[in-house]
Image (cartoon, rainbow, N blue to C red):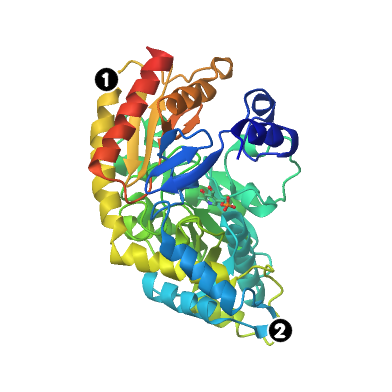
């Protein structure tokens, strides 16, 4: 390839998602052409540490030939079999059975999608359909949190709690209610963890009482909020929230799109907090991003209810349970389990957190927080007031340019620098990431 030609064609013809298209026209894309482990190379041969694992998803690292072989073998056998109309292929069936073994508790029944937003749409629709079949069709409302990210399709977007994703795309479907995020740094200052959790529980109970539990289908949340700002809840948060939901008979949907498959230091985020959802959604790490795949798992009780009606379940996507994607997922899970990669996520995550915490000495670092290999260095203009840099300062774009110059790819936002490297990252590679982040912050803010 010719790097300059690719850049010109991209600017002329490619509409990037989640990208400032105005800026892209002027600066062009960063074209990545090869990957190996935690490293990726651009079209001009420069090497970067992929400190964001693609989009939080390349859990087993780049360049694993076994996954390419799994895809080729399945494509040669039969590339596509639908799952509509009672059809199925072996990898799809095997994957559902494997997931039933891996997910804790009664999450034993799976429907597949092509990604996270489709999975959350499916979960929301299953929750409503469950109540409809149970003779409670008025149970439709969905509770979620501010700072949540559940994807950009209309239902998932409505559960998402970051207003920037809504601007210009209204109206949103009604029936979505947003609660406070368990973000202690900003919303629980001066409180103990117990006091902060008690306040969030009280808000939840008041909301349920106000709306009427008989109108609420489900509560959806990420075990650790990711894209909204790596919000790590206090340990007691999830058990306390789950207890309230149980009391009112409201279903709990956990969105494990980022936290699933090892990222937080256990196989699933729910295991960090000892909480058992009725419905789980996942994507990203199930294939380490080698091909698109997502899905929803439901409890035995929900599956029994769905199968209790002699009627067609009128939901699903052409690519629900794509055989090639499922074959790749099975091979990916073999690697993840054989290498016990969640253990390295826990150890490397603890090391990164400990080392990056030193940055809190700097006048512009408000807080460094993380769980496993989900980490954030939160940047503020003023530490005492926790005031953010104004949009005109363009903190995100400046940090993005500086980190890329320093040879690391991370997510840079108005809040600071987010990291989520592959779960295979070594101690020496952690040091490269730490040095790159520290140097880029100095480049922009010292
Ligand atoms: N849910 C969570 C927690 C996510 O982080 C994301 C994407 O980052 C999604 C859902 C949406 O996934 P997708 O982009 O595959 O639709």
Q: Quadrant of residue 116?
A: bottom right
Residue indicated by mark 2: 311
The number of numbered discs placed on residues in the rendered structure image is 2
Q: Does residue 23 show up?
A: yes
Residue situated furthest front in the rendering? 1
Residue 415 rendering spot, x and y as whole percentages: 47, 28
Query: Of callouts 1 and 2, which one flags the residue occurring earlier in the amino acid sequence?
Result: 2
Residue 413 rendering spot, x and y as whole percentages: 50, 30
Residue situated furthest bottom in the rendering? 310
Q: Do the CB atoms of the residues marked 1 and 2 lie less than 8 Å apart?
A: no
Q: Nearer the viewer, residue 207 or 438?
A: 438
Q: Give the number of the mark in front: 1 or 2.
A: 1
Marks 1 and 2 sit apart, C-alpha to C-alpha, by 62 Å
Question: Is residue 315 shown left or right of residue 185?
Answer: right
Q: Nearer the viewer, residue 41 or 249?
A: 41
Residue 154 rendering spot, x and y as whole percentages: 69, 51
Residue 421 rendering spot, x and y as whole percentages: 38, 44
The disc label shown at residue 361, or none:
1
Q: Nearer the viewer, residue 60 or 255?
A: 60
The answer to whether 424 is drawn above or below residue 430 in the figure is: below
SS of the residue under disc 2: loop
Q: Does residue 247 show up?
A: no
Pointer 2: residues within 10 angstroms few (<14), some, or many (20+)?
few
The disc label shown at residue 421, or none:
none
Residue at position x 68%, y 87% in the image: 310
Quarter of the image that includes the C terminus = top left
Q: Nearer the viewer, residue 311 or 358?
A: 358
SS of the residue under disc 1: helix
Residue at position x 68%, y 65% in the image: 138
The answer to whether 288 is drawn above or below residue 206 in the figure is: below
């Amino acid at each position: 390839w010719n790097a300059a030609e690719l850049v010109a064609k991209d600017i002329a013809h490619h509409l990037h998602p989640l990208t400032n298209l105005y800026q892209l026209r002027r600066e062009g894309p960063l074209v990545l052409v090869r990957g190996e482990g935690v490293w990726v190379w651009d079209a001009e041969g420069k090497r970067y540490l992929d400190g964001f694992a693609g989009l939080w998803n390349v859990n087993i690292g780049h360049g694993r030939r076994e996954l390419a072989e799994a895809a080729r073998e399945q494509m040669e056998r039969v590339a596509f079999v639908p799952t509509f109309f009672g059809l199925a292929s072996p990898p799809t069936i095997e994957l559902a059975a494997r997931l039933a073994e891996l997910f804790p508790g009664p999450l034993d029944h799976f429907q597949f999608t092509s990604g996270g937003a489709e999975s959350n749409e499916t979960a929301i629709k299953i929750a409503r359909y469950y109540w409809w079949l149970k003779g409670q069709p008025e149970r439709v409302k969905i509770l979620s949190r501010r700072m949540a990210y559940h994807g950009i399709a209309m239902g998932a977007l409505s559960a998402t709690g970051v207003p920037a994703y809504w601007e210009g795309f209204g109206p949103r479907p009604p029936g979505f209610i947003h609660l406070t995020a368990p973000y202690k740094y900003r919303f629980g200052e001066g409180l103990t963890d117990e006091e902060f959790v008690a306040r969030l529980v009280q808000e939840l109970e008041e909301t349920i009482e106000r709306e009427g539990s008989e109108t609420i289908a489900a509560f959806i949340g990420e075990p650790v909020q990711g894209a909204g700002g790596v919000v790590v809840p206090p340990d007691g948060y999830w058990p306390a929230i789950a207890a309230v939901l149980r009391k009112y008979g409201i279903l709990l949907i956990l969105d494990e799109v980022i936290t699933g498959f090892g990222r937080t230091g256990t196989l699933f985020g729910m295991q960090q907090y000892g909480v058992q959802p009725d419905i789980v959604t996942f994507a990203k790490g199930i294939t380490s991003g080698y091909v698109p795949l997502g899905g929803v798992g439901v409890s035995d009780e929900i599956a029994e209810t769905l199968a209790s009606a002699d009627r067609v379940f009128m939901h699903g996507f052409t690519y629900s349970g794509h055989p090639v994607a499922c074959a790749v997922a099975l091979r990916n899970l073999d690697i993840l389990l054989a290498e016990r990669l969640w253990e390295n996520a826990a150890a490397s995550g603890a090391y990164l957190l400990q080392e990056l915490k030193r940055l809190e000495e700097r006048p512009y670092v408000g807080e460094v927080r993380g769980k496993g290999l989900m980490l954030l260095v939160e940047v503020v203009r003023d530490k005492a007031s926790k005031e953010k840099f104004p949009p005109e300062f363009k903190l995100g774009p400046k940090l993005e340019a500086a980190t890329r110059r320093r040879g690391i790819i991370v997510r840079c936002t108005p809040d600071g620098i987010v990291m989520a490297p592959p779960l295979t990252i070594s101690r020496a590679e952690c040091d490269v990431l730490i040095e790159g982040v520290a140097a880029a912050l100095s480049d922009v803010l010292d």
